[in-house]
Image (spheres, coloured by chain):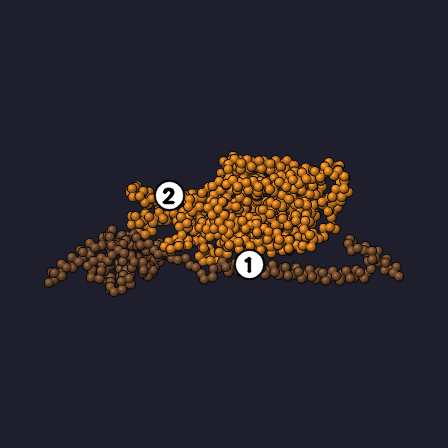
Amino acid sequence: MWEKATILLFVACALAQDLCSPGASDGYKVRLSIKTALDDQAYEWNTNELFLFRAALAYAMRSYLPDQHFEVSNILICDETPRVSFWFVVTSVNSATLIKKEDVENAVRKSRSRINSAFLLSDQTLEFVGIAPTLAAPFVPATPPWLIAFGVVMGVVGAGIVYFLVSAVLQRKRKKKGKMADDEARAERGISGENGSGIYNTSFSDEEKMTEM
Amino acid sequence: MDKTTKSADEDRPKWDNKIQYLLTCIGFAVGLGNVWRFPYLCQIYGGGAFLIPYLIALVFEGLPLLYLELAIGQRLRLGSTGVWNSISPLLGGVGIASMIVSFLVGLFYNTILAWVLWYFFHSFQNPLPWSTCPLNVNRTGFSEECEKSTSVNYFWYRETLGITSNIEESGSIQWTMVVCLASAWCIVYICFIKGIQSMGKAVYVTATFPYLVLTIFLIRAMMLPGAVDGIKYLFTPDWEILKNPQVWLDAATQIFFSLSVAFGGLIAFSSYNDEKNNCERDAVLVGVINSATSLYASIPIFSILGFKATSAFNACQDDNILALTNQFDFSDQNITRENYNHWFNYLNNTFPSTISSLNLRTCDLQTFLDQSASGTGLAFIVFTEAVIEMPGSQIWAVLFFIMLFSLGISSMFGNIQGVLTPISDLKILPKWLPEPLVTAIVCIICFLVALIFTLGSGNYWLEVFNAYVGSVPLLIIAFFEIIGVIYVHGMKRFSDDILFMTGKRPNIFWKACWMVISPVMLLGVLIAYVALQAQTRPTYPTWNPSYEFFPQNQILEYPDWVFAIIILLSVLPIISIPIVALYGLIRRGKRRSSTRVEFSAYSNGGFESEYRQNRT
């Protein structure tokens, strides 16, 4: 019995190796650029990190196909390189068949941000070759900021124009009043022969006062 | 003749102090061209070597013209129409030509300010709106037009201008642009509401603020990577270029247009001065500060362009590094920018076919530095792209656009003054119309006419105005100005005027320039300019998304009716010169008696007619 179990195990391992290969039709290549993303804070890629990746992918598959309980063992890795890149395939829960490419793609798409944040990476630094990142919609704020800036500037300018125009009108009214008072004062001094234009010769009027009857 | 005319002068507005006057003149001369035209010319004409024709043109053409305008305005104490009518009724057309040119230039200049306002309002967003492309209709990807060109180009051509594909398609009015244009005219109006009293106060801010911003940019730009490359590129002299006559022509035209002579604005400004004011010192000061500002502005501009080129170069290299790393599965960051060349050569020798299949771009810093631009392209495309890469982009964008706005509006003051002073001097409007109302009417008329530039094809029309109104007519007006003052008014009489105003006669340098050098230079520049323009059918670059080589500009020829409008625009301002001269000659022929109505209210009629009769 032990021999049968051992043989089965070997066959399973061999099968597993066959299932995952570079260029597998149902597999994807993954590339990580940890140093580019994290600089000094970069962590080293080792078997533990690989375990995390497999777990994250298993989580993604579970989210996408909720009735199937994927395990870490269902994610097969091969062809690791120092780039940090590798191929992976996902087997079904009973480890018999591979999950189809489209399903894997959709699962990864759905949980992409969770997988990224597990590794502190982004769409560009954790690359699934062949799965394009979904585009983030541009941020549209509720009130467009330009409207606020415009409102402030035009408010100040408009207020300024109104203020100046009103003060000009008021000044003119004051001048008119002053002018009327001036005219009255002049009329009192007795400018009989004056027709109102030109420069008034004061010496003439003084004489008039003195020779007033 | 030598008497001061104080009595009738009392209701003419005055500057509060000398500083206001100087700042206004400097603000008028220093405009957008100092920031976006001079650095470009410096760059394409061999950097440091360009300064030689530029300074020669300044000393022999710019300063004499400037001095002449300031002196004649201060002496005769009238705006451009009044001054030329005083010198000789036959020359009255020169003043009217100045007024028309000021009006036409003011129209499109304020539209540029409206664009600057639009960008200013949009600089308060995070992220900046021109840094990302908008999504396309079905939200599967970015807008196609934006993808093919860049987000910055898209924001300028599509979202700001709403540009059509050629000048014949007018497109629709861009309402957002109309609002910005109205704002720009309102701001101009509020600064002019009390004539030079309010403008003189506004100019304290608008003339000095650009220098502050330029200094801030200089400090910031110097700390950016690649700044030194930009500066080296700008100033590396290429002495060979001096053999090319085009360089001398461009230097002369640049000085001429940069100093804003022949607009009539400078004459108007100096007419509000005290009579006894040293205008020689003012002229030299304004001219030198204008050129110094051009030089000073080119340093931060080119530092930032150097930074932009370096960023583009680094991005190009990073792309190549990524391609190589992915292809050969090297460890991340094994190939860096520093050892890229070493790795590339090694790999190319060992795996040549693989390398060629990768289609790596050749990254050359020089090509990126060569991508220069001038005019609106520099401000709204190149610079906005550079600003995105700088940390704290919003602040830099806001500062930059406020600076452009201050530079532009202080030049607008000169343009508007060149229209308002002749109107008040010609006394064509009734006296009971208050000045703020006249200013408002002028601003409203300008706004309504400038609505042309808010159409889809507005940018194309603006280029037409810019190239043809603000060039040949000004050269012709300036030429007639010099001839008018030196030969009609008389060199001796002008020397006496200057003796009266400054206390000493003009020295031999000024006399030589006015009598011979400047007119000859102007005539030479004018002829060369017209000859060059007339050689080829004028063309213009267009933005056409359906062009097969998009995003390159499709170059089209102007259609015939636009060509006719171009001719009209070039001729319209200067047609007044011969018309008024003819009219004056006819009148003089008809009325030989000495009871001619003297236009200038300030000269003694009896003395004048006697003098005139002796001369004619």
Indicate the secondary structure of the residue bearing disc 1: helix
Circles 2 and 1, Cβ within 8 Å, touching? The answer is no
Left or right: residue B6 versus residue B390 is right
Can residue B537 be seen here? The reply is: yes
Q: Is residue B591 left or right of residue B467?
A: right
Q: Amino acid at mark 1?
A: Met
> What residue is drawn where x is 57% and y is 41%?
B568
Q: Position of residue A152 (x, y in %)?
A: 54, 60
Front residue (pair B523, A177)? A177
* Cα–Cα gap, marks 2 and 1: 49 Å
Q: Colour of chain A?
A: brown
Residue drawn at the location 60% of the way across and 42% of the way down: B572
Tell me which chain the residue with mark 2 is part of.
Answer: B
The quarter of the picture where the C terminus of chain B appears is top right
- Between residue B321 and residue A20, name the one nearer to us: A20
Q: B223 or B153: nearer the eye? A: B153
Q: Position of residue B415 (x, y in %)?
A: 60, 48
Q: Please name the color used to draw chain B.
A: orange
Give the numbered dot on residue B362: 2
Q: Nearer the viewer, residue B437 or A131?
A: B437
Q: Which residue occupies 10% across, 63% down?
A: A1
Discs 2, 1: same chain: no
Secondary structure type for disc 2: loop
Where does label 1 land, which residue?
A154
Dividing the image into 4 quarters, which one contains the N terminus of chain B?
top right
Residue at mark 1: chain = A
- Residue A20 pos. (x, y %): 22, 54
Residue at 38% over, 57% down: A136
Residue B278 placement (x, y as % from top left): 67, 46
**Label disc, if present, on residue B285 of the rendered structure:** none
Residue type marked 2? Thr
Image quadrant of residue A8? bottom left
